[in-house]
Image: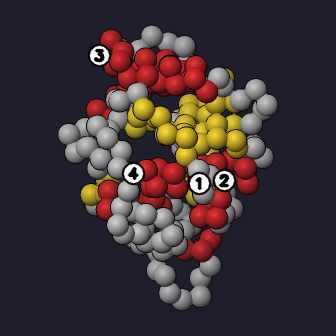
Amino acid sequence: MTGTPSTTGHRTLREEWAHFSVTQLCDVCCPSITNGNRRRDDNPTVSPSQGTAVHRAIESVLRGETPPTEHAAVCAHATAFGTLIGGTVTAVEEPLVTPELELIGIPDALFQMEDGSIAVVDWKHSADIATDATTRMEYPFDRLPRCALARYALQVSLYGRLLERFHQRQVSALFVCNVRTGRSYDLPYLRLEADF
């Protein structure tokens, strides 16, 4: 990331956020749950390497492979979640590239639903996901509370918008699934914030 976009001047929002990933954009606008350029999520005891290992294990399950035994519990939550929503996995950790905006997003999983629409899923491995806050995110998302759940809603909404606008896919649902606790969140589609 080259720096924080300014909120002044005559540049458009599109120009302001060019060359960013969806994750970087969310980190800049919701710094209360970040530590420098590295997200700390809601549980500082979960290291980035642990989170990466969990994501890889879930990816292996979604691809029909056998996961490592040390991650059996979180993989069971991910499998149960996939069964619950009833979709078919169509993509796992595949980048959504937008040459026009030079913005990239990498959703954890995309499920195709019976009607052909897409459910965007992001896996989290936190002890808990904060759902309320007394302050707001930074511009241009200052309508949203500065809490983990709102940040995740923004993140998956941006993935949804990238799918619709640049990949001609209809998005019908957005989820965050906490594979540590087994709790999933059916998130609102923040179309106003994600429409860039």
Residue at the location (49% across, 40% down)? 185
Q: Outermost residue toward the left?
A: 45
Label 2–label 1 contact, CB within 8 A:
yes
Q: Secondary structure at mark 3?
A: helix
Q: CA distance from mark 1 to mark 4?
A: 19 Å
Q: Position of residue 158 (x, y in %)?
A: 59, 54
Name the residue that disc number 1 marks: 158
Name the residue that disc number 4 marks: 131
Q: CA distance from mark 4 to mark 2?
A: 23 Å
Q: The N terminus lies in which quarter of the figure?
A: bottom left
Q: Which mark is residue 161?
A: 2
Question: Left or right: where does residue 138 sit relative to residue 47?
Answer: right
Question: Left or right: where does residue 181 sit relative to residue 25?
Answer: left
Residue at the location (61% across, 27% down)? 85
Residue at the location (50% across, 19% down)? 79
Name the residue that disc number 3 marks: 70
